Amino acid sequence: MKKILSLMALAMVLSGCADSYGSGPIRIGAILPISGRIAEYGKQTRDAAILAVEEINAAGGILGRQVELIVEDDEADPVKTANAFTKLVERDKISALMGALTSNCSLAITNLAMSEKIPMVSPTSTNDKVTLAGEYVFRACYIDSFQGQVVANYAVDTLKARRAAILYDLANDYSKGLFENFKKVFEARGGTVVAESYNTGDKDFNAQITSIRGFNPDVIFLPDYYSAVALIAEQIRNQGIRVPLLGADGWDEVAGKADTWMMPAFYSNHYSPESQDPDVVKFIAAYKARFGVEPNALAALGYDATRIILQAIKAAGSAQPTEIQKALVNVSGKFVTGNISFDANRNPIKSAVMVEIVQGTSGLTTRYAGTVNP
Amino acid sequence: MTFFAQLLQQIVNGLALGSIYALISLGYTMVYGIVRLINFAHGDLLTIGAFIAYFCLVALGITPLTLTIAILLAMAVTPLFGYALERFAYRPLRDAPRINSLITAIGASILIENGLRVVPFIGTEFRRFPTMTTAQWILMQSTDEFGQLIKVTISQTQLLVFFVAALLMGVLVLIVDRTKTGKAMRATSFDMKAAALMGINVNRIVSFTFLLGSSLAAAAGVLFALSYPQIEPYMGIMPGLKAFVAAVLGGIGSIPGAMLGGLILGLAETLTKGFISSQLSDAVVFLILIVILMFRPSGLLGKAVKEKV
């Protein structure tokens, strides 16, 4: 009798599982920093994901089912990311995850994604280590060893820099990875590098900047997210250092947080909104019509990451996470941020653009300054 | 840059940071001196002050005049929150065991921080605080052996921080040492029951202390926001914590001690970051605290009070 009961219970559990993936709307989770220091990124990425899901639902959904997006806020805090992941998997029974946004947060859940067998596609985590956890972890962006190389080469070739100072966040994998990759390439090309560091959330950088000032750099590389960068840049200019500032994709949105003192400044990014590519034009128009603002690069990647997942679900013909994973490996096509197909480590191979911060009609804006192919 | 010039520059940086810590730690020390309560919500009053100044500056634009108005407005409005905190959170518990007030203080702090996050016009986003210019003055200038120009500079913001902090600390010392209310504050701090028996309205004095402390916290908040121009509801936590350490370092309950503690803390933090390692800066700060408390358990300028049995 006991055995029959437990078998029945097991059957109920199993059918419960099958139900959650096999009928009703297909649920996709998203873990993004909707509040906190990089809320601009989380909100735009979320909106882009909403747009992608709304578009597919308007076209009849996939596999004859509607798609439901469940968004959780991680405040860019790895602990909260892990909690949100558990909630999405245990309670919401998601088929796949779009996220997390920052490398730090993604690294906090890659092992969970592996053990729970939930495919995750990070829109924007560029740190090299993110996808190394295993076959369930994908991303829609290029990686930092490429990005660091792009920025270092730009410093040497275009800005003719010989001496570079780097100020990075040693508690942040994204910042640290970029620092290492930039330093490697810049030194290999004959340059001299001096590096100073700080901790996430620090506000006073005057001590480190004074040390950097003593080094007389030609450029200063600031591999961090826009809100920290705006703070650091202003303190650099306050100490009378006027050399060009360099950054990476974490700088997207910095133009809105700074003023003319920021210039000259350059950074690498995932796409340029000035592009005339029909997919880009179409995406920008749709996003603007829906949300009233121009999408940043994070939004473009969020849109692409969501569409990669949707495409994989369609190709898999199933909402089972393990089936989606198998289909994700073979995703290939042209997306807003370029052609995407995954290499052996589930990283897309794609190009980067350099942009310059310039004075616009109202405040600062960015100008396209070149494309670099891998 | 020569080592000496770099050292001087780091000292300027450290003193600017330290004078903000000093200004905040005054509020901790005054409140502790009178009601023996560590007001953990003090750092959040700094946040409120910074937000008041922010809305004022956004509405008026930033000029020296509007900045003065913003500082004064923040110093005038923030104390209302400080008063409410005292009146509704701490006063009902004044005769309860001290641990109850302490827990209430932590609760009040969490309430303010998260309360601000849900207020629609404040929210969770990081806002850029308006700043004037990135202008700076050269304090010292020469050339090194390679013909490189070496300068020791002070930014306009740093100068403003020194000036306002010194002015406010001067005014505070005058109030405490030279006025009748100040005398009543000192008496209440010495012995609350005896002061009450002597006809001092203790409740009024405690409220006044909170008003004064919150006003200084608000000014510190504006200076902090000007120096590190980014504000959000959690911005007061770290400076609040550091200022608390400064107050303990200087001798909690002692006003000159809080000022000294703040300056030492700012200098230690900056010099460690500049010459040793930014990873170690907090470790060094707390090491200094431990060493000082080992040799002087009541802090640098604190009075050792013998417990009467």
Image (tube, coloured by chain):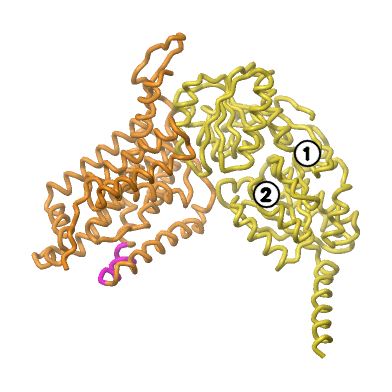
Chain colours: A yellow, B orange
The residue that disc 1 covers is A337
Chain letter of disc 1 in the image: A
For residue B64, side relative to residue A113 (left or right): left
Give the SS element for disc 1.
Answer: loop
Q: Is residue B87 magenta?
A: yes
Q: Label 2, secondary structure: give it.
A: helix
Give how far across and how far down residue A248 sits, in percent: 65, 33
- Closest to the observer, B249 or A367: B249
Q: Is residue B79 above or below residue A216?
A: below
Residue located beneath label 2 in the image: A107
Q: Position of residue A80 (x, y in %)?
A: 60, 57
The magenta region covers B86-95
Q: Does B213 appear above or below A282?
A: below
Left/right placement of residue A239 relative to residue A105 reads left
Query: How far apart, in angstroms, are the residues tagged by discs 2 and 1?
Result: 23 Å
Residue B256 x/y as whole percent: 22, 44
* Labelled disc at residue A199: none
Residue at the outermost bottom position = A1
Q: Main secondary structure of the magenta part?
A: helix
The amino acid at mark 2 is: Leu
Q: Is residue B36 visible?
A: yes
Question: Is B259 one of the magenta-colored residues?
Answer: no
Count of marks overlaid on the render: 2
In the rendered structure, the residue with mark 2 lies on which chain? Answer: A
